[in-house]
Amino acid sequence: MGFEIDRERIAAPQPTLSKSATDQLRLMLENDWTLEGKSIRITISGKGCGGFDYALGFDEKHDQDFEVKAEGLPFVFDPFCAFYAQKIHIDFQFDPEQNADGFVLTHPQQKEFMGKFWRQDEDKILPVKEDD
């Protein structure tokens, strides 16, 4: 028995970006020919006791996706991610001394998603379409 997410009951997400993330994403989209026509996809890549884990990549838009712009850049979210990552913030960190660089995605309400939240709060249950 499957279910279908009720996309109509989900608001479009509103990602925010740091200047370094905006600059890095623009650089990638403008200079990597393999990304032509692609959007920046934000996904939920897992969940642990501390809440959701998020990932960023490049992909084609799918039929059920939410398509939004932030800082003039094209983003896509599947309905599941759109529901749980409404206010995702994207930063790009570059620290050659620590040999670390990459995108860091954070969610300001991350604490709300710790543990087994869906069993206690009706507002945090993914909306699904009712069977006719």
Image (cartoon, rainbow, N blue to C red):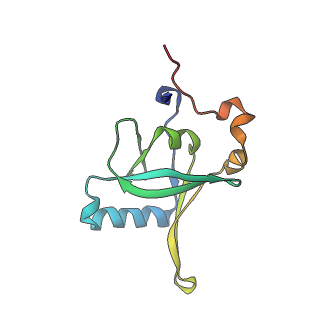
Farthest top residue?
132
**Point 52% across, 40% down: residue:** 80
Please determine whether, in this image, residue 121 is positioned above or below residue 38: above
Please determine whether, in this image, residue 35 is positioned above or below residue 120: below
Farthest right residue?
120
Residue 92 is situated, as x and y percent measured from the top left of the image, at 51, 67
Q: Nearer the viewer, residue 2 or 101?
A: 2
Side (left or right) of 91 relative to 118:
left
Residue 77 is situated, as x and y percent measured from the top left of the image, at 45, 44
Residue 76 is situated, as x and y percent measured from the top left of the image, at 41, 46
Examine the image and state in which quarter residue 123 appears: top right
Please determine whether, in this image, residue 109 is positioned above or below residue 105: above
**Point 57% across, 46% down: residue:** 87
Q: Nearer the viewer, residue 127 or 48?
A: 48
Farthest front residue?
1
Q: Give the number of marks.
A: 0
Q: Nearer the viewer, residue 54 or 15?
A: 54
Side (left or right) of 120 relative to 98:
right
Residue 9 is situated, as x and y percent measured from the top left of the image, at 53, 27
